[in-house]
Image (cartoon, grey):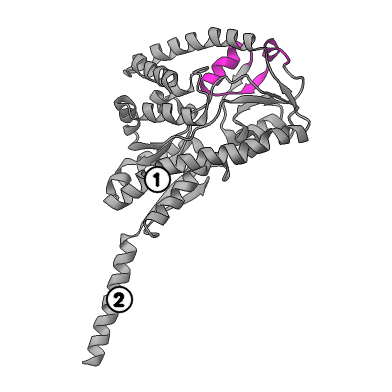
Amino acid sequence: MKSKMMGVAVSALMITAFTGEALATEWNVSLWGKRRAFTENVEKIAELVKEKTNGEFTLNLSYGGLAKNKENLDGISIGAFEMAQFCAGYHADKNPSLTVLELPFLGVGSLEQEIQVSQTLYAHPAVVADLARWNATLLMPTPMPQYNIVGSGDAPKKLADFAGMTVRATGGIGEAMEALGAVPTSMTASEVRQAMDSGVIKAASFAPHAHMAFGTVENATWWTTNLNPGTVNCPVVVNTDALNALSDSEREALLGSVDEALAFYVQNYNEKTMVKWYPLLEEKGIEQITYDPAAIADLKEKVAGPAAKAWIEENAARGLPAQELYDLVVSTVAGS
């Protein structure tokens, strides 16, 4: 009898252990590069989810081990992983609704404002439907400040000096550079350093954290302080089926951690990234070029209107409510 009771007890423990293991949820998250300011929103939400669920729901972050950065949306669509970060400009045809946020000279002035504008757009039914084609649900933005240009060789002291220069620039930033006579070249962040070192491009547009993370400052000789042509929109998305399969408590742990993760991201960017940027420029002897505000205003007038008009026409032809999306972004910027 004693032996039988012990057997039952062991079996019960095994079932409990097995059940506990079965109930645990693990998601794989596809990122790229290395941990940096750009990924701190994902790092933080992984920490919060694990903490709130006592380790029963974990996010396994992979930096390049699951997919290339241009393939993250494809991976989400087939369920190869449950969460990913990507940039809309890497494949504008796959997520046209998001590219309105990459138009040049929208006037977004802070990370907090970038979050508000992004989240407002993400909630629009047409944007939800656009991402649903990839079985993707938008979770949160990855706000970035306005891009500026780092380059080597002769510094463009005047905006006209960009004429003929090869510059890594995507989306609306590329349109702004093209208006200056530059030759915009689209490539992912991880390709830029090699392209600069080999002379394929002479300059690159990035936010400060990426200039540091991807090494474009290593051989640079100049940086523009106030060109501010725009930024890129890089959301974090989740596989919709995986999101729907979560328990109520797991879903609450994930969705309820977004605001805290974004607040941490902004604090980290301002307090840890930007405080390093200017001392680094000084340390490396990189010339800081500031353009006449009147010249910047003239460039904005020449570029912003035509770029917006072209975007609206192109995406209305796709069946998107393009004018409505653009007006939503503009009104949100103006009101925030």
Check the image and report above or below for 62 versus 306.
below
Check the image and report above or below for 251 versus 111.
below
* Whole-percent x, y for residue 21 in the image: 34, 64
> Which residue is rendered at x = 59% and y = 21% of the image?
228
- Report the residue marked by disc 1: 257
* Whole-percent x, y for residue 103 in the image: 48, 19
Q: Earlier in the sequence, mark 1 or mark 2?
A: 2
Label 1 to label 2, Cα distance in Å?
A: 33 Å
Check the image and report above or below for 6 versus 126.
below
- Report the residue marked by disc 2: 13
Task: Report the magenta residues as a range.
Answer: 157-182
Residue 172 placement, left or right of 151:
left
**Residue type of the residue flagged with mark 1:** Ser
172 vs 248, nearest the viewer? 248
Determine the image quadrant of residue 268. top right
83 vs 187, nearest the viewer? 83
Give the structural element (helix, strand or loop) at label 2. helix
The answer to whether residue 67 shows anywhere in this view is: no
> Which residue is rendered at x = 58% and y = 42% of the image?
36
> Which residue is rendered at x = 46% and y = 52% of the image?
47
Q: Examine the structure image and report whether residue 315 is included in the region drawn in magenta.
A: no
* Whole-percent x, y for residue 90 in the image: 49, 29
**Residue type of the residue flagged with mark 2:** Leu
Give the structural element (helix, strand or loop) at label 1. loop
- Quadrant containing the C terminus is top left
Check the image and report above or below for 138 versus 107.
below
